[in-house]
Every structure is written in C-alpha cells, then in structure tokens.
Amino acid sequence: EVQLVESGGGLVQAGGSLRLSCAASGIGFDDDYICWFRQAPGKAREGVACFRRSDGSSFYRGSIAERFTISSDHKMNTVSLQMTNLEPEDTAVYYCASSKRAVRMWYPSEYEYWGQGTQVTVSS
C-alpha cells in the first residue's frame, strides 16, 4: 500500500520561503502522479502542483508557478514543493496525494492515497 508522508511545514513571515517534501513508499510504476493540494480553514481542498513520474512533467494550477516549484528526487519517490514569496493567503494544511491517472488533475476525488498533511502558516 502506498504511504505518503509530508514534512517541512511551519510558520513563516510574508515574503519568506518554505520547502515541503512528500516521501512516498510502496509506490508502483503506475502511480504516475504525485501532487500537492492545500486546504485553508473553511475552504475546499484545492490543487497546487503536480509531478508526473513517467516523464518528469510538472503542472501548476493558475499562476502559482510564479512562486512555487515542484520537483522530485532521481528515484521519483520524494516530491518537493519549493514555495517562495509566501503570502498570508497561502496559509493552509498542505497535503500530497498520489494517483494512477488523474484525468481531472485538480479534483481531489481523482487521488487514491493521501498524506496526513503539514501546516503552513504565513504571518503578515
């Protein structure tokens, strides 16, 4: 069974940076997508960035690519999210998730496995 463990969250001032990591175990070749989602209090869970393991492609929701970068280690079992120029609106619990297909990439229902989440708090 796939297990995903996030790390790297914390408290940072606006304009600062954080790097989140998602360590995946039990993952197979067909678990092609590892993605980051986030959920702020009182809001729906939303997609942030995705990494496609089969070809190393990266995908970002909206303009988030201007500040966030998703990457993977050479084994493609650890996927990181480098976040820069953080804003208070980025405050949320950040989750990583895996999916075999992710036809609708930004829909949480497409993902079979989820990590426990890591809190990111950006102060103004």
Image: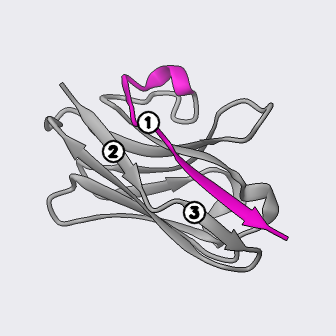
Residue drawn 63% across and 50% down? 61
Q: Which residues are magenta?
A: 108-124
Residue to which mark 3 is pinned: 10
Q: Nearer the viewer, residue 113 or 41?
A: 41
Label 2 is placed on what type of residue? Val
Quarter assignment of residue 112: top left
Quarter assignment of residue 91: bottom right
Q: Nearer the viewer, residue 95 or 67?
A: 95
User: Which residue of the protein is positioned furthest toward the front in this rendering?
Assistant: 11
Residue to which mark 1 is pinned: 116
Residue drawn 57% across and 28% down? 107
Based on the picture, tell me whether residue 84 belongs to the magenta stretch. no
**Circle on res. 5:** 2
In the image, residue 48 above or below residue 100: below
Task: Using residue 75 as the reference point, say whether residue 11 is left or right of it.
Answer: right
Based on the picture, tell me whether residue 112 belongs to the magenta stretch. yes
Place of residue 54 in the rendered image (x, y in percent of width and height, measured from the top left)? 23, 48
Residue drawn 62% across and 56% down? 120
Element at badge 3? Answer: strand
Place of residue 117 in the rendered image (x, y in percent of width and height, measured from the top left)? 49, 41
Element at badge 2? Answer: strand
Q: Determine contact: label 3, label 2, CB under 8 Å.
A: no
Which of the two labelled residues, at mark 3 and mark 1, occupies the earlier sequence position?
Answer: 3
Place of residue 122 in the rendered image (x, y in percent of width and height, measured from the top left)? 73, 64
Distance from disc 3 to disc 2, alpha carbons, whole Å, reads: 15 Å
Q: Residues within 10 Å of mark 2 (few under 14, many from 20)?
A: some
Task: Using residue 48 as the reference point, say whether residue 5 is left or right of it.
Answer: left
Q: Determine contact: label 1, label 2, CB under 8 Å.
A: yes
Residue drawn 85% across and 71% down? 124
Label 3 is placed on what type of residue? Gly
In the image, residue 55 above or below residue 102: below
Q: Residues within 10 Å of mark 3 (few under 14, many from 20)?
A: some
